[in-house]
Image (cartoon, rainbow, N blue to C red):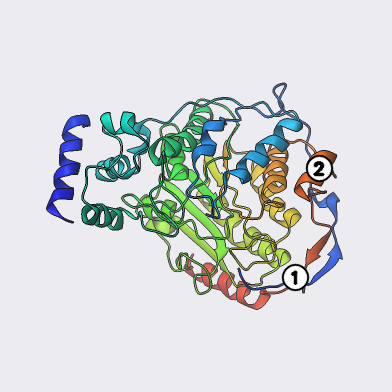
């Protein structure tokens, strides 16, 4: 990195110390598969649900697929159903430094684009840097055009979503059986680099908070993309097991998450799925690949990342899951009866993310998922039902590949 960039960071440290179209449908849904347990909380409808509208400021650009509207719609739907949100406040720099380097944190602050004279006067923004130095710093810390450009309010918006995940983890650490931070789930950020739309790795921070109380913490990721950032942060730490079921790296970024990535003492578990795999095969692989690993590890707390982008309508990936089969994985984690932090994650179709997150949150709270979305929202969002009317097919797609993955997993144990 250029000397001037190093000097700027040093001074600051001193001052502050797919598109594969598979749309064949068949087989009607069976909603009876979603088991509803008696509600175990008195009030509110869902306990420890952390959200504030400031989290919507995390907007990389108007055309970027990670749209704040996904979160806004999910929250509107949940509040219609009686969920009361709690303002978590902003996370602190100390929270960030649980899993990120100090140099990276300071780079995020320096590279946060200026918003006006007031901010520049207080040291925010990089108007004083020469453009070549900006580009070098952006390249070193992952802020390049495309997935992860620097964007206005990047630092404060990232602290906002991180705050929800931190408070949820603290609630579980302090005795709550369940807490939510669905604005989070940004699982790709590395220790010193932004990646995959993610600036701060809030799932990793949540795991770190839980480790203050629990000897063994599991991270379970059902996003279509490999949970690489969390895996690499804890790769040599046998007290945190990272489990990820995702589309294989041959057809989807980030290209990692192979069975052979086993971590310290087999604390990294990966179940890659072939493109076009249907939900029946995906769920079977989750039950036979992830659940036995959790049984062996015996976690005392879990962080669940609930990316919805395995859905067959998602535009950025190539699996053919349904809302109800995806939800069954959430049910399986809930039924373990282990203290749980529930986070959001990926998902880029505005007709799937709100209903799937809402269904997952209600299910985790032992509440029944309605058949129909409220009429006005159903019409405005073109999203009449919570569950898919039909399941994508042909059923059993990806079975041979999945069996090979499960056999390789078994051979490693």
Which dot marks residue 373? 2
Please identify the residue farthest to the front as the structure is shown: 117
Q: Which class describes the residues within 10 Å of circle 2: few (<14), some (14-19), or many (20+)?
A: many
220 or 124, which is in the foreground? 124
The kind of secondary structure element at disc 2 is: loop
Asked whether residue 214 appears in the rendered view, the answer is no
The kind of secondary structure element at disc 1 is: loop
Is 382 above or below relative to 215? below
Q: Which class describes the residues within 10 Å of circle 1: few (<14), some (14-19), or many (20+)?
A: some
Asked whether residue 48 appears in the rendered view, the answer is yes
- The image shows residue 263 at horizontal and vertical percentages of 39, 59
Q: Earlier in the sequence, mark 2 or mark 1?
A: 1
For mark 1, what is the residue? 23
149 or 80, which is in the foreground? 149
- Residue that appears at 64% across and 60% down: 310
- Residue that appears at 44% across and 55% down: 267
Which dot marks residue 41? none
What's the distance in space between the residues labelled 2 and 1, CA to CA? 23 Å
């Amino acid at each position: 990195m250029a000397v001037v960039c190093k000097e700027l960071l040093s001074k600051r440290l001193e001052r502050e110390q797919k598109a594969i179209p598979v749309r064949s449908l068949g087989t009607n849904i069976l909603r009876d598969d979603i088991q509803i347990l008696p509600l175990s909380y008195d009030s509110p409808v869902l306990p420890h649900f952390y959200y504030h509208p400031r989290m919507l400021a995390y907007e990389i650009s108007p055309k970027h697929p990670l749209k704040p509207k996904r979160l806004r719609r999910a929250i509107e739907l949940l509040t219609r159903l009686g969920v009361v949100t709690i303002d978590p406040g902003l996370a602190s720099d100390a929270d960030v430094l649980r899993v990120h380097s100090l140099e990276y944190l300071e780079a995020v602050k320096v590279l946060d684009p200026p918003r006006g004279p007031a901010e520049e006067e207080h040291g925010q923004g990089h108007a004083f840097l020469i453009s070549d130095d900006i580009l070098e710093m952006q390249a070193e810390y992952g802020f390049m055009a495309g997935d992860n450009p620097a964007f206005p309010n990047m630092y404060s918006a990232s602290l906002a979503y991180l705050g929800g995940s931190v408070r949820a983890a603290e609630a579980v650490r302090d005795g709550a059986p369940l807490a939510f931070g669905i604005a989070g789930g940004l699982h790709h950020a590395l220790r010193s680099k932004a990646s995959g739309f993610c600036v701060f790795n809030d799932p990793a921070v949540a795991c770190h908070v839980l480790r203050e109380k629990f000897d063994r913490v599991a991270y379970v990721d059902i996003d279509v993309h490999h949970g690489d950032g969390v895996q690499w942060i804890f790769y040599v730490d046998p007290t945190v097991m990272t489990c990820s079921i995702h589309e294989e790296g041959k057809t989807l970024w980030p290209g990692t998450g192979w069975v052979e990535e086993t971590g310290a003492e087999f604390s990294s578990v990966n179940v890659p799925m072939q493109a076009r795999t249907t939900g029946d095969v995906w769920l079977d692989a989750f039950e036979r690949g992830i659940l036995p690993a959790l049984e062996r590890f015996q976690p005392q707390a879990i962080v669940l990342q609930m990316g919805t982008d395995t859905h067959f309508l998602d535009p950025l990936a190539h699996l053919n899951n349904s809302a109800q089969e995806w939800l069954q994985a959430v049910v399986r984690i809930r039924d373990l009866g282990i203290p749980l932090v529930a986070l959001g994650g990926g998902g880029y179709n505005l007709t799937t993310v709100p209903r799937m997150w809402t269904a997952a949150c209600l299910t985790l709270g032992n509440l029944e998922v309605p058949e129909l979305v409220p009429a006005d929202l159903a019409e405005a969002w073109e999203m009449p039902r919570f569950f898919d009317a039909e399941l994508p097919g042909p059923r059993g797609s990806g079975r041979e590949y999945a069996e090979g993955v499960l056999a390789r997993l078994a051979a490693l144990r």
